[in-house]
Image (cartoon, rainbow, N blue to C red):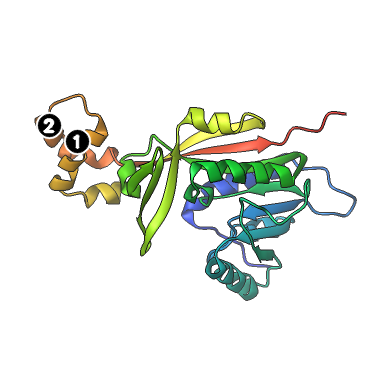
Amino acid sequence: MKNQVVLRANAVPIYQFLSYMNSNPVPVSSGGKPKILDCGAGGPVPPLALFHQHGFDTWGIDVSEEQLARAESYCNEHRIDIHLQHGDMRQLPFEDDTFDAVYEHYSMCHLGKADTALAVGEMKRVLKPGGSCFLGFISTNTWPLSMFGQERLPGEYWGEEAGEDAVLHSAFTEHEADKLLSNWEIVQNEEHVQFLRSYAANCSIEDWMGLYDEAGYGGSIEQWQDNYGNRVNSFRYSHLFYILKKPAKHS
């Protein structure tokens, strides 16, 4: 019996998408497997391994050769056959209507807003009519957004992450996200909120006071200072997740 694939804790939404796919199986040719694409498939524990274990024909692209190598190492170690290749979700190296399902997980958030629109369009292009898509956006309900760095364009933040100095994160309002997905059928959408308790614990009183303006707090700065002891529920990372369907072609 093969070892059970267990993804990282932040991959809970991937399990939800898998559950949706298993509950709503796509029609495939006799003897075939549903074909799924991961846009941003690299990393030490690739989510595609889970879909492979559940009988999918698994394909993945990543713009980072380093991350692809880490995913390939995992697949080799666990004898998992996944089709991995270098590629950019803004210009997917596949023909139209190729996949039964496509998804990204915490990858698209590193694109600017214009490039996000390109990626969403590409995911739709390579998806078969009636196929399913899972994707997400950082919500502007995240606080403080300045933890992602300096806002250079509206909703686009550049800062340090995992030792890299210039990492982009884009944040969307729910209205912006819905508008970007207006030509899809929205099957499910929900907001996931993670309270950043360790971030709050490491926030000094000086840092807390520096967040007064960003918080849009209605009280005085003295009252804001008094709230320092209750900051644990203030720091949050919010993500908007969608399960989508590509509309069937009209006859």
> Which one is earlier in the sequence, the residue at label 1 or at label 2?
1
Crowding at dot 1, Cα within 10 Å, few <14 / some 14-19 / many 20+, comes out as: some
Q: Residue furthest right?
A: 30
Q: Nearer the viewer, residue 112 or 184?
A: 112
Question: For the residue labelled by badge 2, is the local secondary structure a helix, a strand or a loop?
Answer: helix
Kindly check if marks 1 and 2 are in contact, taking CB atoms under 8 A apart as contact: yes
Question: For the residue labelled by badge 1, is the local secondary structure a helix, a strand or a loop?
Answer: helix
Q: Is residue 77 visible?
A: yes
What percent of the width, then of the height, locates residue 65? 56, 69
Q: Is residue 195 visible?
A: no
Q: Nearer the viewer, residue 206 or 191?
A: 206
What percent of the width, then of the height, locates residue 104? 59, 49
Question: Residue at horizontal 43%, vertical 48%?
Answer: 169
Task: Locate residue 199 relative to residue 108 in the image: left or right.
Answer: left
Q: Nearer the viewer, residue 97 or 28?
A: 97
Tag shown at residue 127? none
Question: Residue at horizontal 60%, vertical 44%?
Answer: 118
Judging by the rendered image, the residue that carries numbered circle 2 is 221
Which amino acid type is marked by label 1? Answer: Tyr
**Taking 126 as reference, is 243 above or below it?**
above
What percent of the width, then of the height, locates residue 179? 56, 29
Which amino acid type is marked by label 2? Answer: Ile
**Taking 243 as reference, is 161 above or below it?**
below
Judging by the rendered image, the residue that carries numbered circle 1 is 212
Task: Locate residue 139 relative to residue 124 in the image: left or right.
Answer: left
Question: Residue at horizontal 65%, vertical 36%?
Answer: 244
Residue 59 lies in what quarter of the image? bottom right
Q: Residue furthest top?
A: 218
Instruction: Measure the C-alpha gap from mark 1 to mark 2.
Output: 7 Å
Q: Quadrant of the N terminus?
A: bottom right
